[in-house]
Image: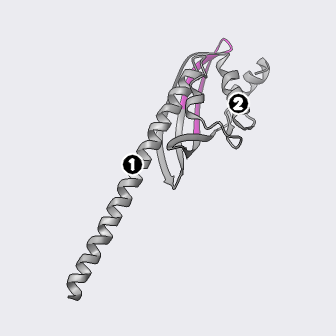
Amino acid sequence: MFVEGLYICSAVVLDVRYVMSTKRVAAEDDVRAASDQFYSALEAMANGDASSMADIWSHADDVTTMHPIGGREVGWDAVNASWTGVASASTDGTVTRTDQVVRVVGDGAYELCGESASMTFAGEPLRLENRATNVYRKENGEWKIIHHHADLDAEFAEKVANMGA
């Protein structure tokens, strides 16, 4: 009987582990889909249109960003204004994500990746290679980005400062 009980207990543990693993993988896939949406919006921004950022970002007061242009924005209005400002001077952009790692912890998740971008900014070609961290939160059943941080790029920051964006 003890061996039989041990077998049943082991089967239950394995089943629980399988269910937990399956849920974790599904949540990570959902965050990857949100990341795809963010990087599509980022590429649209590099082509002059930041409007799709509103679809993937949380609009809460606690959202933040630290762009390659320097500074820190807090709250949706400030974060959105930063995307819109850069978009106003950007054309011909491409953005790719590399080396993605996603981790989910409850209703929060983070992503580590590399970003490569090229665009024409304020009439001049610009190329960026950054490390990035993105933080997501599940809101009303959807993963929304609540923080984006990319390495500072001194050239980009100077160009933005010179144009007053």
Camera-side mark, 1 or 2: 1
Q: Is residue 122 magenta?
A: yes
Say which of 162 and 50 sits in front. Answer: 50
Task: Measure how far apart labels 1 and 2 are at the Cα level.
Answer: 34 Å
Q: Position of residue 25 (x, y in %)?
A: 39, 51
The answer to whether residue 104 of the structure is visible from this angle is yes
Q: Residue at x 70, y 22 (%)?
A: 85
Say which of 48 and 21 sits in front. Answer: 21
Residue type beneath disc 1: Ala
The answer to whether residue 132 of the structure is visible from this angle is no
Q: Residue at x 75, y 25 (%)?
A: 158
Q: Residue at x 28, y 75 (%)?
A: 10
68 sits to left or right of 27: right
Identify the magenta region: 116-131
Residue type beneath disc 2: Ile
Q: Is residue 67 magenta?
A: no
Q: Which residue is mark 1?
A: 26
Mark 1 Cα within 10 Å, few/some/many (few <14, many 20+)?
few
User: If the image is split into quadrants, where does the N terminus sit?
Assistant: bottom left
Q: Position of residue 3 (x, y in %)?
A: 21, 85
Q: Which residue is mark 2?
A: 69
